[in-house]
Image (cartoon, grey):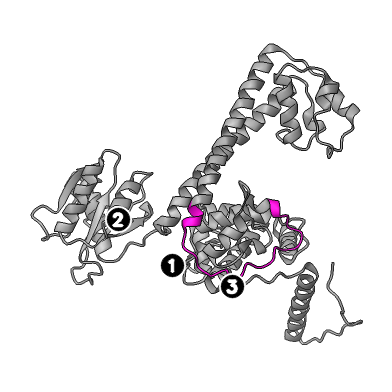
Amino acid sequence: MKSKPRKSEKKKKKTVIDPAWELIHPEAAGIDIGSREHWACVPAGSTGKNVRSFGTFTADLEALAVWFRECGVKTVAMEATGVYWIPVFQILERRGFQVILVNARQTKNVAGRKTDVKDCQWIQRLHTYGLLQGSFRPEDKYCVVRTYLRYRDEWVSARSTQCQHLQKVLQEMNVQLHHVLSDVTGASGLRMIEAILDGQRDPVKLAATVDRRVRASQETIQKALVGDYRPEHLFVLKAVFELYHTYEAKINACDGQIVIEVAKLPDQVDVKVKPLPARKAGRQASVDKMLQHDMRAALYPKLGVDLTAIEGIGVLTELVILTEVGPDLSRFPSEKHFASWLGLCPDQRISGGKVLSSRTRRVINRVSDALRMGALTLERSQSALGAFYRRMKARLGAAEAVTATAHKLARLVYRLLKHGEAYVRQGMADYEKRFQERKLYALQKTAKMMGFELIAKQPITQGVS
């Protein structure tokens, strides 16, 4: 009777790829990205040793590009590892290689012991047979503006933190400015704080610095300015006040660079042939300004359409769409693919004919975040999109309503950018009327299937409220 082999004696299963598979990219290379070194693999037979290690200095990356050129490589695949891939990607792309950035989930299943050498060989093999799908990345000229915009978001977040510290220290001093001002960091609030730091303690003189549009009475403002001005609180107030203005200056510097770089982008339409449409009713011209520049007029020729005509989308959201996606949506065959890339559509997981889950995927996408923020602003909008959001909120809940409305916004953005058409606004009354017609049609269809016929008591002349 033979004994069972030990675990150590069992042969390890190796991943075998049929050599009869079609070579989609015969001149493909794979790179395993690292913080100190990059391992690269080229097709076997193109050179004596097809796996080499390169450093991360610029001279090493240039040598990597030269080696690829000598080996006849035309396309390169690499994993999206932190920010270490960015210099490699940019240098290889500048040298004329077709570079694709791959999600690590597509390349993680490496048979056997995992090493950097095996990783680069596995990436090269998968890319050779066309089994890797590159992540979407806009053209380099749009990535330039994207860098400034992302850096601006970091400064805005830091400034928000200082606003919270400012409110906290004022509360500790019992200076109740938040009861009389809608925004402590507005013009009136900053003037009063600056006067307090200059040594002014008289509430009458401090209250005289507020703007005439403040609704609170002078008497109430004076009561709010009587506080406990302790030295330690004043020290913290001064430090926070200075940091707030520092971040404000950094944001303005980013805004200046964004205005300059946006002007350098290529135009998609000639404004003389296709002029900018009129601003939608009720929209203030000041909300479209960035350092006194009309960004709505600046972005229109770069995208070819006016996205701010859509309810819930402003110039900052339009900037995010321009820099994260660009005006060319040819990489997305349909609006469904675009919504799937944004993570705004159900991700159905089916096994054995049973739907296990239909929740949306968790993705990190700035366009998706911007559209969700835009959907939140539609809660009180007297438009079709506002009515849609409120109906979804009553039916599904707040979180699902935001996702559903952001999905609707994404489809509108895709249609406008893809076909270059102007947005036609639909009123809330028209939306409610059409919704009622669809609901009535569904009821009549159900009744007919059951052998009944619906007869209305009175003709329906207007939509429900």
Q: Would residue 132 be counted in the magenta stretch? A: no
Can you tell which of label 2 and label 3 is closer to the viewer? 3
Q: CA distance from mark 2 to mark 3?
A: 34 Å
Q: Would residue 268 be counted in the magenta stretch? A: yes
The residue type indicated by label 2 comes to Arg
**Quadrant of residue 454 within the rendered picture:** bottom right
Report the span colored magenta.
Answer: 261-286
Is residue 225 found left or right of 69 in the rendered image? Answer: right
Helix, strand or loop for disc 3: loop
Q: Which mark is residue 331?
A: 1
Can you tell which of label 1 and label 3 is closer to the viewer? 3
Q: CA distance from mark 1 to mark 2?
A: 21 Å
Closest to the observer: 150 or 78?
150
Q: Position of residue 312 (x, y in %)?
A: 67, 58
Closest to the observer: 293 or 106?
293
Report the predominant secondary structure element of the magenta stretch. loop
Helix, strand or loop for disc 2: helix
Is residue 141 found left or right of 338 in the rendered image? Answer: left
Q: Is residue 42 visible?
A: no
Residue for point 70% across, 20% down: 197
Residue where numbered disc 3 is placed: 274
Q: Position of residue 375 (x, y in %)?
A: 66, 56
Can you tell which of label 1 and label 2 is closer to the viewer? 2
Q: Do the CB atoms of the residues marked 1 and 3 lie less than 8 Å apart?
A: no
The residue type indicated by label 1 comes to Arg
Q: Earlier in the sequence, mark 2 or mark 3?
A: 2
Q: CA distance from mark 1 to mark 3?
A: 26 Å
Q: Earlier in the sequence, mark 1 or mark 2?
A: 2
Q: Earlier in the sequence, mark 1 or mark 3?
A: 3
Q: Position of residue 99 (x, y in %)?
A: 31, 58
Residue where numbered disc 2 is placed: 94
Q: Position of residue 448 (x, y in %)?
A: 75, 86
